[in-house]
Image (cartoon, rainbow, N blue to C red):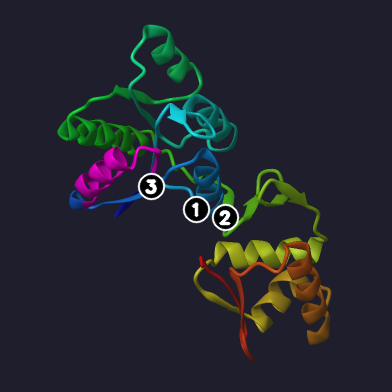
Amino acid sequence: MKKLYYAEDDMTIARLVQEYLNRLDYSTEIYPTIAQAKRALEEKVPDLLMVDWNMPDGSGDELCRWVRRRWEKLPVLFLTVRSDAKDVVSGFDNGADDYVTKPFELEILASRIRALLRRTAMDGQNPKEEGVLRCGQITLDEGKTAVFYGQEEVHLSRPEYGILLILMKNRGGTVTRRQLLEQVWDSGGNFVNDNTLTVTMKRLREKLHNPACLKTIRSFGYRMEDV
């Protein structure tokens, strides 16, 4: 099931769109402020984002620019009453993939969504981006060898980064302590004892603000999972 986010403060319109799209087997979540939409995006990236222009705490084009700085390939669709040519041009210039003016037919909206999702699939694009792993507020960018908690970059030691990378790549599955010891330390020919893993994991948790998505599976290992 495709996941859609809708940044819209008019709950009458938002609920109408949500109910219609849910019937079409799209999981649609509503966020009435830009701040709430940003928090949701940092937690989990959807397959498509719908944005109203006039929001109580800012503008849709500002949200679109914020999205583009982080997720270049995430499809963004404006749904707004602002139909002036300059507004449409501004929407596209700020990163929108499509622009639909209110009032609109729900069937047409659905067709625009299908077209955007098809285009994403045909281009081989992934909104989550290759090499970028997320769980909760944690983001790991393999290309940059960088880790973030929300917008804050977290500086990790090599073993801490290695542990996090393995857990993120295996998100949803349990990784044993033995696997971590073998892959993080023994792979380099450096044998360490079990206590070293315990201490390193404790430091990693502290640097990541003790995230709820990092679970300890008692007497077995660890697991990263959405909460």
Q: Where is residue 60 in the image (x, y as percent from the top left)?
A: 47, 28
Q: Verify CB contact (< 8 Å) between mark 1 and mark 2.
A: yes
User: Residue placed farthest to the top in the image?
Assistant: 85
Residue receiving disc 1 = 44
Is 111 situated left or right of 10 in this image? left
Q: Dot 2 lies on which element? A: strand
Q: Where is residue 188 in the image (x, y as percent from the top left)?
A: 79, 68
Q: Name the amino acid type tagged 1.
A: Lys
- First reached walking from the N terminus: tag 3 or tag 2: 3
Q: Dot 3 lies on which element? A: strand
Who is closer to the viewer here, 80 or 21?
80
**Mark 1 and mark 2: span between their CA atoms?**
7 Å
Residue shown at the point (72%, 62%) measured from the top left: 208
Query: Which part of the image, by quadrant, shows the N terminus?
Result: bottom left
**Mark 3 or mark 1: which is in front?**
3
**Mark 3 and mark 1: span between their CA atoms?**
14 Å
Q: Dot 1 lies on which element? A: loop
**Mark 1 or mark 2: which is in front?**
1
Residue receiving disc 2 = 134
Q: Where is residue 14 in the image (x, y as percent from the top left)?
A: 31, 41
Is 56 situated left or right of 148 in this image? left
Q: Name the amino acid type tagged 2.
A: Arg
Q: Name the amino acid type tagged 3.
A: Ile
Residue receiving disc 3 = 30
